[in-house]
Amino acid sequence: MPKREITVYVDYKSPYAYLAVCPAYALEIEYDARLNWLPYVLQIPLYLGTVEGRNDHQWRPVRYSYMDARRLANRVGLVVRGPQKIFDSSLAAIGMLFAKAQGVFKRYNDVTFERFWKRELDIEDPLAIKAVLEEAGADTAAFLDYQKEEGRSELERLTEHAHKLGVFGVPTFVLDGELFWGHERLDLLKERLHQTEPPATIPTDRPRGEDPRSRWC
């Protein structure tokens, strides 16, 4: 039986997308699924206003979201430090597409998420993203040109397709055309997977290096 494909939309500036990474990796083992990771860049000022222009009502959910994300991150040993500005994560998203094409997605994904939320990575700096790609094992000779033209065109195309599917936030999981928004909807996604195929047994003697989940899972 072919593997079920689950599309996973994430944005590196979303703490909730960060929290969903490890549980998403686990789906590959538990359900013998194939994950198709895609970027979806949130346009935060469109619904929460700019930092300078936010009113009290807009600041309340922002402050709560980061408090909640830190609370959840502490439970699983992750570091989430609130960003000091609203970042444009499109460059990091293009880096994801480049990493996928180079076959080094997972390492790039892990490093980008982890360092950004530790305030150790400027995701708006092309040279910083290039360095992460190199660390992940990519040949980056073409990256600086790619991120200016081809990569941006591909990101726009993927964003338009995501909107046609109904995607509006991250993390969003798509299974057979059905959307599941938020890492707290993973139980519903698993119910759908159960309806067609029982979960695979996870080997207890699997070497750590062979586990497709993140090193910080």
Image (spheres, rainbow, N blue to C red):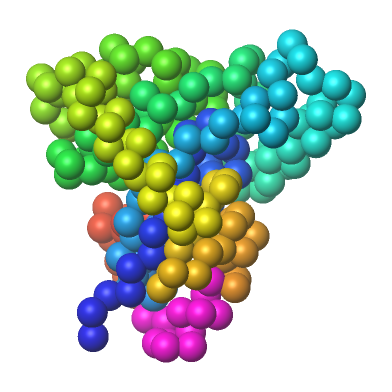
- Whether 40 is among the magenta residues is no
Q: Residue 124: percent from the left, percent from the top?
A: 42, 16
- Which picture quadrant has residue 182? bottom right
Magenta stretch: give its range.
Answer: 189-200
* 86 relative to 22, above or below: above
Q: Residue at x 37, y 24 (%)?
A: 91
Q: For the N terminus, which image quadrant? A: bottom left
Given residues 213 and 40, the one toward you in this image is: 40
Pinpoint residue 109: horizontal percent, then vertical percent: 36, 39
Per the picture, the main secondary structure of the magenta-coloured stretch is: helix
Residue at 62% x, 15% y is: 85
Across and down, in percent, residue 102 comes to: 15, 39
Q: From where the camera sits, is residue 216 visible?
A: no
The quadrant holding residue 69 is top right
Compared with 157, 145 (above or below) is: above
- Which of the two residues, 107 or 159, is positioned nearer the viewer here? 159
Residue at image location 32% in from the left, 21% down from the top: 129
Whether residue 159 sits left or right of residue 71 in the image: it is left
Callout count: 0
Asked if residue 40 is positioned above or below residue 178 in the image, the reply reads above
135 with respect to 28 (left or right): left
